[in-house]
Image (cartoon, grey):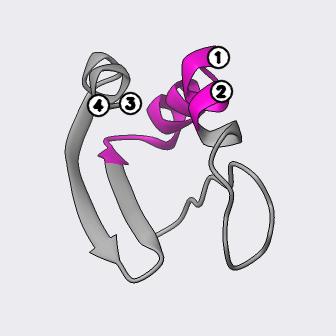
């Protein structure tokens, strides 16, 4: 994920540990760049394998400010 984010021009990223797991936040300069990142097969596969414990959904991509 980090390699893909850097290749897609991420401007910053961070890991935060929570009681239920880890959050990996990535910031991109534009929404278009973010959408290109989220559309990659690698990114979809990685996120699809990780369940969201709160909603029960797999591979939830959160966007917004």
> Which residue bears the numbered disc 4?
2
In the displayed structure, would residue 46 be above or below residue 4? below
Are discs 2 and 4 less than 8 Å apart at CB?
no
Bounds of the magenta segment: 27-46
Mark 2 and mark 1 in contact? Answer it, CB < 8 Å: yes
**Mark-to-mark CA distance, 3 and 4:** 4 Å
* Residue located 29% across and 31% down the image: 2
For mark 2, does the 10 Å Cα neighbourhood hold few (<14), some (14 to 19), or many (20 or more) residues?
A: few
Q: Position of residue 40 (x, y in %)?
A: 59, 19
Residue 43 belongs to the span the image colors magenta: yes
Please say if the residues under marks 2 and 3 sit with CB atoms less than 8 Å apart.
Answer: no
Image point (57%, 32%), residue name: 46
Residue at the disc numbered 2: 45
Q: Is residue 45 above or below residue 65?
A: above
Q: Are marks 3 and 1 in contact (CB under 8 Å)?
A: no
| Marks 3 and 4 close (CB-CB < 8 Å) | yes
Residue 41, disc: 1
Occupied quadrant, residue 18:
bottom left
Label whose residue precedes the other's in the sequence (2 or 4): 4
User: In what quadrant of the picture does the N terminus appear?
Assistant: top left
């Amino acid at each position: 994920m980090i390699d893909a984010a850097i290749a897609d021009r991420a401007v910053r990223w961070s890991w935060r540990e929570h009681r239920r797991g880890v959050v990996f936040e990535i910031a991109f300069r534009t929404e278009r760049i973010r959408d290109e990142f989220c559309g990659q097969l690698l990114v979809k596969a990685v996120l699809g394998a990780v369940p969201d414990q709160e909603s029960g959904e797999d591979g939830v991509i959160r966007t917004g400010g």
